[in-house]
Amino acid sequence: MRNFLKGIIVGIGGIAPGLSGSVLLVILGLYQKTLTAIGTLFKDFKKNVLFLFPLILGFGIGVIIFSKIVNYLLGNFEMYTRFAFLGLVVGTIPLFYKEVKKEGISKRYYVIILIALLIGFSLFDINRGMFPTITEPNIFQSIFLGIAVAGSSIVPGVDSAVILSSLGLYELYVSSLANFNLSVLIPAGIGLVIGALVISFLINKLISRYYTITFSIIFGLFLSIIPNVLNNSCVLGFNVQSVIAILMAIIGFGVSFFLGDIKGNMTKLKGIFKSFKGMVNMKRVERLTENNKI
């Protein structure tokens, strides 16, 4: 059940602009386990399926639910929604960085992060608008949609929304999920499975052999995508709308940071609640003692 609920959270990253589902997997401590389970699916089939099934089920439900919500919010409250997503993304930076330096980090890795950041900026700027928007795909384009979703979902920091938008596939992706268009979703599902198996195997090999350098490159790419969360509708000024937008970003940051260590934060909240409850009980005892003395 815990993995199912985490899968739903990861599903938000699968549909929200700027927020990568794989980054959420890293933050929730499931990324390497998921990669290993997919990459070695047939070596220990029963164990891997028991781990992946609730996670994938939750992810699918999360994507379907939030595709409708995100579609509505972007259509009616785009500025506020994008600033909320910006807060969610920025909130993952310290948690992602903690994962990058888990096995130690030196100055050369910061250079690698900077190079990956600059490459990411140039790639996403060059690709923007290069491919026409696809609204009526053929079967091969639908399969490619699935492969693109798999690649952008598995590689942390490579945002699905940005990659799919660059390829002219994002509107097709969101509308197909929102309308449950099986003529697109079935071939896309085939592409998703093929892409997931191949790409997860490759990334798993890279991480197991070159952990810090791989995550440094991924972290740099992740940072390069952040500006793409906002667009021309997100211009701040001295007005109420801007204040609300900033508040939404702060709320998004808080939610993201809380989810980063949900177990530890829940323990802290329980501790605070117990302390508060203890203080209330002490005051009751003191009050009763005073009444008895009287």
Image (cartoon, rainbow, N blue to C red):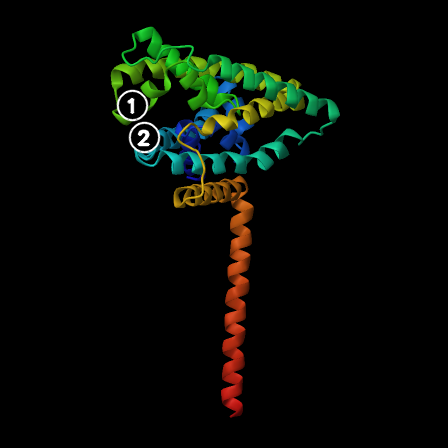
Residue 287 pos. (x, y %): 50, 82
Q: Which of the pair 91/268 is nearer the observer? A: 91
- The amino acid at mark 2 is Asn
Residue 103 in view of the camera? yes
Q: Earlier in the sequence, mark 1 or mark 2?
A: 2
Residues packed near mark 2 inside 10 Å, few (<14), some (14 to 19) or many (20 plus): some
Q: In the image, is residue 55 above or below residue 166?
A: below
| Mark 1 touches mark 2? (CB < 8 Å) | yes
Secondary element under disc 2, as helix, strand or loop, is: helix
Q: Residue at x 29, y 7 (%)?
A: 138
Taking the view exactly as shown, the residue that stands out farthest to the right is 107
Q: Residue at x 40, y 10 (%)?
A: 131
User: Badge 1 is on which residue?
Assistant: 175
Percent of width and height locating residue 110: 69, 25
Residue ID at (60%, 22%): 117
Helix, strand or loop under label 1:
helix
Residue 111 image-quadrant placement = top right
Q: Which mark is residue 95?
A: none
Image coordinates for residue 247, horizontal then vertical, percent: 45, 45
Q: Distance between the residues labelled 1 and 2?
A: 8 Å
Q: How many labels does the image show?
A: 2
**Which quadrant would the N terminus be assigned to in this image?**
top left
Q: Nearer the viewer, residue 253 or 37?
A: 253
Instruction: Inspect the image, locate mark 1, and give the three-letter code of the amino acid beneath it.
Output: Ser
Q: Which mark is residue 71?
A: 2
Q: Residue furthest front?
A: 238
Q: In this view, does 85 lie to the left or right of 267?
A: left
